[in-house]
Image (tube, coloured by chain):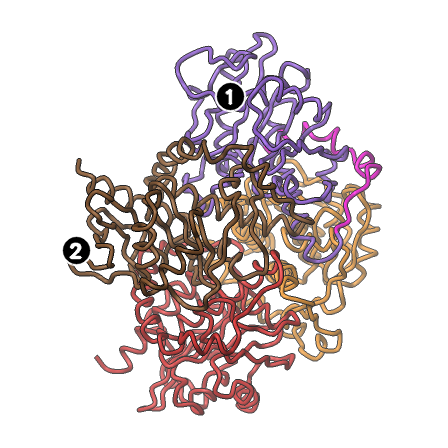
Chain colours: A brown, B red, C orange, D purple
């Protein structure tokens, strides 16, 4: 199999899994990058059906956001992806999601810190892109990338999140994990003061080192779940932010 | 196709989509208006099944709430719709919903401000109709319409919301968007102080200008979702307010 | 059709609807009373499957909780029902539910007041049965009934609710309505101070007078929804309290 | 039937029920113990599909966590189970779950107390294992077991819960009950101050004595529910913690 075949297949599967988990839908897009060819592979954007995305539906782009094959709407926020793919050797898979819970950290005045052991992969914190607009130009993409630095994620004010990973499996795992972190913080705060882990605890736990193994073990589990899913929409499923 | 055929088809589709999203059910009704003929088209009211509404089920009314064809219960709150259709040239589609989250702004002592970029279409704020009764007479309808002014929405105390739009697609999009705004505010407030966008931020973002494009792009997406929906009720789905 | 046939049919349908709405399941039971014969009809209790209850499964009891026909577990809290049926001429249908949201008013230190227009049928307030035990004897049943007085409902501390109605349709409607009230209060309190309606507002609205019409219009809607329901359990559906 | 056949069958059923209830999934594992043979039976660990676990999938282990038959990943936190099975004669069934709500008590600064009558089986309180790491060695398992003492459960910081029971039926019942307790506390706290039951109230209620009867009555109910379940994943179902 060629690299392109593998990446298209993985990205389509990941799109369907995220749709099943209601982290992608009317909005949101994910991408992966082949540094050999300089090609970016991206799922279709706003208004396309995500639960049935197949490898042939994946859009091949160059680093200027130009569609290299066929005709389709390229998501207008393509610079979120291309700037990061070009800038960081470890940014081979990127998700831009309007995750229902994680996005709340872009709305409330609250600094994110990990509350679960697994969440300690985000132990360096997650910065906020505070600009009240979309990221539609390479310049805006560079601003965003500069704030992320070598971090793993960023919140976009009143909008969504970006997650940076080394491959599609880690991007999926980190996306689900961040959503779970946010949901737990929201729910736990009803009980009392939330006690996040310190940066030291996070470093000591070593989730970072274990991430590849965990992400690649979760992948077939989630893939199998998506295969037996009947594709029914959840109700109240549209996350607009 | 005649205008009537088009409007009946659109309104029936919109009713089913809102039912799938659990924004309409035992209660709630939506309408669209044909200024050429002065006819209002409205979905059936309380107690009718919304998930299977077809174009033939749509009720044609005049601006006095009189049923122009067939026999059916006309929703008792018809003046919500007719007064606005008659008064404003841009009020061609109107939703009265008991949306589970948006209605909370009619219950809690909290002024609504947009918390997401897309929510900035509500940047002018949303007033409250504070009367503790239904809107069953043209006079009450005029009171309600006066409070809305040229706005896009209103909260009705302990009851629900009204959304005013230029066409059915925008009415659907704005209804889902407002619900998402309210859900995000409720959830985000668990994390800390919610930071809404200022009126200036909202104006600068330009969601207003982009609304028609977005709403018309969301429409086939939501229509497709409804077509593959198996019609199963969510549980706990009855929004009574 | 005999009264017994009618009441068995209605009660079985109501049980299935409440199961669909996740207000009854492993726990909870409902009853209706025929004053002509002094017979109480009750759905099966703990551990019986509620989503498939048919008229033949309904238990006929006398006012001492004795099973009049067949063999079955009589719910141990039968005195909740029998004492009220015997005492009040308007208590012809009674629900004892572990409703997920309504039960919260028996756990938190908060007096219930209606927050929606329809909720104003509970405008007289809802008292609390503060005893930390089940209601298993006629004496305990009388204590409970005394606290209810001529009211429509009661909260049972750390346990559930009892709802009193004139017929099965009103019992179903009031049960769903109270759950919706509680859910709205919980959610709205995230936004700010909840503003319940005053007793005067409630009386003025007249929900009381309109209840029979509304409840009997909701009945076929809910019955139809249950008929097309595929019976699938919601997840996380067990309300234990 | 041999004891092994019975235990494998029960544990597989319990795994599927917990999967349906979304208390087990990508993570979490349960076990039961046969003191006659010293064998531990455990469900498969991370990454295995839980909704379809059958008796043959159950892993037989010795008390050192060694797989006695076949080839499979043994869950790395096997010492949670083996130390408790070896130490306590009443620890014949053990669940380690990442329950979405119960885990919140390991995140927020809040001491757990029962809020429902049935929850009074946890009336002795539930301690916290405050170490920021997994339990992967017998020594860590002994630390955990020492903190549990002769208690029924423990919270693990930013991670999950352990529940100790006399048989699989009680383990299932207690797991669902603790989750319901936590959900109720979270939701009720929106209304006002939560009023847990005192240790005296809990002792007086006698839930302890009634637990075997209740758990064994709930078992066929839950088993039947799982049998008619179509196995569809809930959305947003991954509890990571």
Q: Nearer the viewer, residue D177 or A152?
A: A152
Image coordinates of residue D30 in percent, x first then y, are 54, 26
Identify the magenta region: D194-218
Instruction: Using the rendered view, name the quadrant where residue D93 is placed.
Output: top right
Q: Quadrant of the C terminus of chain D?
A: top right
Q: Nearer the viewer, residue B187 or D39?
A: B187
Judge whether residue A32 can be spotted in this image: yes
Instruction: Using the rendered view, name the quadrant where residue D143 is placed.
Output: top right
Q: Which residue is mark 2?
A: A68
Image coordinates of residue B131 in percent, x first then y, are 64, 82
Q: Secondary structure at mark 1?
A: strand
Magenta span: predominant SS is helix
Q: Which chain is indicated by disc 2? A: A
Name the side, left or right, on which D17 lies relative to B207.
right
The residue located at (58%, 62%) in the rendering is B186
Image coordinates of residue B196 in percent, x first then y, are 55, 69
């Amino acid at each position: 199999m060629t690299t392109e075949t593998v990446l298209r297949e993985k990205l389509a599967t990941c799109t369907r899994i995220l749709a099943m988990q209601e982290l992608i839908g009317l909005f949101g897009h994910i991408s992966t990058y082949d540094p050999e060819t300089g090609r970016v592979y991206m799922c279709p954007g706003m208004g396309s059906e995500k639960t049935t995305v197949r490898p042939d539906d994946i859009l091949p782009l160059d680093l200027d956001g130009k569609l290299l094959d066929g005709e389709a709407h390229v998501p207008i926020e393509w610079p979120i992806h291309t700037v990061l793919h070009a800038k960081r050797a470890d940014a081979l898979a990127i998700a831009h999601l309007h995750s229902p819970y994680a996005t709340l950290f872009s709305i409330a005045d609250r600094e994110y810190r990990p509350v679960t052991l697994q969440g300690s992969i985000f132990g360096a914190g997650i910065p906020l892109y505070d600009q009240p607009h979309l990221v539609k130009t390479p310049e805006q993409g560079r601003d965003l990338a500069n704030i992320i630095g070598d971090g793993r994620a960023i919140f976009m004010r009143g909008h969504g999140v970006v997650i940076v990973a080394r491959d599609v499996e880690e991007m999926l795992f980190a996306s689900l994990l961040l959503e779970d972190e946010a949901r737990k913080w929201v729910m736990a705060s009803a009980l009392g003061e939330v006690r996040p882990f310190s940066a030291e605890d996070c470093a000591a736990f070593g989730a970072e080192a274990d991430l590849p193994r965990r992400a690649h073990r979760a992948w077939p589990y989630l893939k199998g779940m998506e295969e037996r899913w009947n594709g029914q929409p959840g109700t109240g499923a549209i996350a607009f932010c």
